[in-house]
Amino acid sequence: MSGLSGKHALVTGGGSGIGAAIALDLANAGALVTITGRRKKPLENIASSHDNINLQLMDVANEKNVLEALTAIQKTFGPIDILVANAGIAETAPIQKTTLDMWRKVQQINVEGVFLCIRELVGHMVEQKWGRIITIASVAGQKGVAYGSAYSASKHAVVGLTRSVAIEVMTKGVTVNAVCPGFVNTAIVEKSAANITAKTGMGEKQAVDILAKLNPFGRLIEPEEVSSAVLWLCDDNAGAVTGQTIQIAGGDV
């Protein structure tokens, strides 16, 4: 498949999970893909799996680092036509035990990181009258989540940011959409299951099953199911879709 041939895509948090699946799908569709993250080894593992994938270390929570990394990426591989703002963390705690440091860390990575990348990259897309911005939000960005106030608030902010930017650029050939997965079979779910196991003593498989059943259809979503939606949003035939939240959540309505 070469539908995205000639396009340069940036996938933040591209070294594992949803980000890695998205990077591979975009590369298979013909795009030149740059993946970013804070850890080099996972990025190298994904980059080595496809000739179209390159890597750049970048910490989305550090504005100076983001600016330097984006400059280096575009100097080496050319302007970025597609942004998939995927990097994020999930921290959980009862509201009474949610520290300000934890709250700020989640917002800095999940919200400010998305904002910085959009702010720096949307200009080129507007100038060339074509661009795709896709934020990876969550069903937690559309409803409340017990023990996940910081995470849910951050994803609500991402959805609001996505919709606002979409309105600004909707007549300029640039689409801006959010993909909102439910519980996906990634390291984040593994970490959540480990937390449940540590606090309750139940087995790891039982803990994973509990999380899987939070998706109405009773199983975890695979990263490739999320990346398929992203790939569709990048297509020229999706040019009329903007400002939307695409839920990949197994019937969570």
Image (cartoon, grey):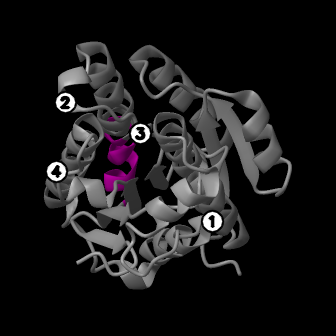
In the image, residue 237 sits, relative to residue 165, either above or below, namely: below
Residue 88: x %, y % from top left: 44, 39
Q: Secondary structure at mark 1?
A: helix
- Of pointers 2 and 3, the one earlier in the residue sequence: 3
Residue 154 lies in what quarter of the image? top left
Q: Secondary structure at mark 2?
A: helix
Q: Is residue 144 visible?
A: yes
Residue 116 in magenta? Answer: no
How far is the residue under mark 1 from the one under mark 2? 39 Å
Direction front: furthest residue: 201
Residue 45 lies in what quarter of the image? top right
Q: Secondary structure at mark 4?
A: helix
Give me the disc on residue 160. Answer: 4
**Disc 1, disc 2: CB below 8 Å?**
no
Residue 46: x %, y % from top left: 77, 49
Query: Residue drawn 66% across and 32% down?
Result: 56
Residue under label 1: 26
How far is the residue under mark 3 from the one under mark 4? 19 Å
Residue under label 2: 95
